[in-house]
Amino acid sequence: MTTTVASVDDEGGANRLGAYLRARRGLLTPDRAGLPAGPNRRVPGLRREEVALLAGISADYYLRLERGRDSNPSMQVLEALARVLQLDDVEAAYLMSLATPRPRARRRQREERVPARLHHLLASIASPAFIEGRYFDVLAANASAITFSPRLAPGNNRLRSLLLDPEEREFHVEWERSVSDFVALFRHSLGDDVDEPRAIELVGELSLASARFREEWARQGVRTFSGGAVQIEHPVLGALQLHREKMQLEDLVLVVYYADEDSPTAEKLRMLDSLATPPLQS
């Protein structure tokens, strides 16, 4: 596997700030920015000069930012760019982090392992629950989760399953939205570690195998972990209305699917649990 994160992102190595600015201005249409589209427009998003004008900086200076010729923009400039590009709080914080990278020693990649106490916690949860690592590898799962979906068994990768497994695509009613969310979560989870071997391997594999991944990765979206409602089309149980909660546990994430009490979905999950087998451990 020779594909690298930098080549996938077209980041030119260290110029991640420029790649992010290009991607985000490409997503912002003139009408959303309060500008007339005008005739003969060749780009779907904003032009560099338009971003510079709205941010109150020179077009030449903005060009230097995108091309990586200025690596130390002021906080005022970054805040203006975040405002013009209509970034939310998470996206704005990500922009700031790209402009002010922290020096760090090269870390030796450690195997992600789940402590015994978390295996005990999973076994005590009556709903489908599993633990994933920073690369969305499933590291541990309770019996309910594995019965709910065999793709939640340890050893699977949530992002790979979502993008490459046809059964997982049918599983998620809002598959397109799920892909956007997962890829944005993945980028945020990586942070400064886009050059880690596991990240390079996974991004390279998905870039070669999935046009949908390439599209979302190029958008440079970032999101933080959050819960919410999920619609599932289960091959045995049919339509399910579930809640999904994600809880950070040091470097791991606990994910729990649960239904409203006494709802039809809750009853279906109880039926499924009667088929559960003992949980697998990493």
Image (cartoon, grey):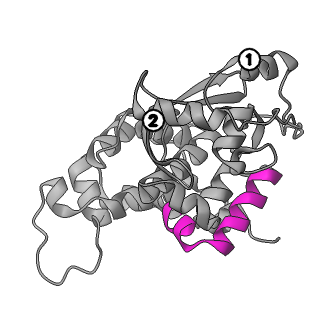
Which label is found at residue 265? 2
Could you tell me residue 220's position as x and y percent?
Answer: 49, 55
The residue range painted magenta reads 197-217
Amino acid on which disc 1 is placed = Leu
**Residue depicted at x 58% and y 47%:** 187
Could you tell me residue 261's position as x and y percent?
Answer: 43, 21
- Contact (Cβ within 8 Å) of mark 2 with mark 1: no
- Is residue 68 among the parts visible in the rendering? no
Q: Quadrant of residue 33?
A: bottom left
Amino acid on which disc 2 is placed = Thr
- Is residue 6 among the parts visible in the rendering? yes
Answer above or below: position of 195 versus 279.
below
Could you tell me residue 15's position as x and y percent?
Answer: 59, 56
Side of 153 relative to 180 (left or right): right
Side of 34 relative to 95 (left or right): left
**Residue depicted at x 82% and y 53%:** 197
The secondary structure making up most of the magenta span is helix
Which label is found at residue 121? 1
Answer above or below: position of 221 versus 88.
below
Side of 67 relative to 48 (left or right): right
Give the quadrant of the C terminus: top right
Kindly state the secondary structure of the residue where label 2 is placed: helix
Could you tell me residue 142's position as x and y percent?
Answer: 74, 31
Label 2 neighbour load within 10 Å: few <14, some 14-19, many 20+ = some
- 2 or 1: mark nearer the eye: 2
Per the model, the C-alpha gap separating discs 2 and 1 is: 23 Å
Say if the magenta span includes residue 216: yes
Which label is found at residue 70? none
Kindly state the secondary structure of the residue where label 1 is placed: helix
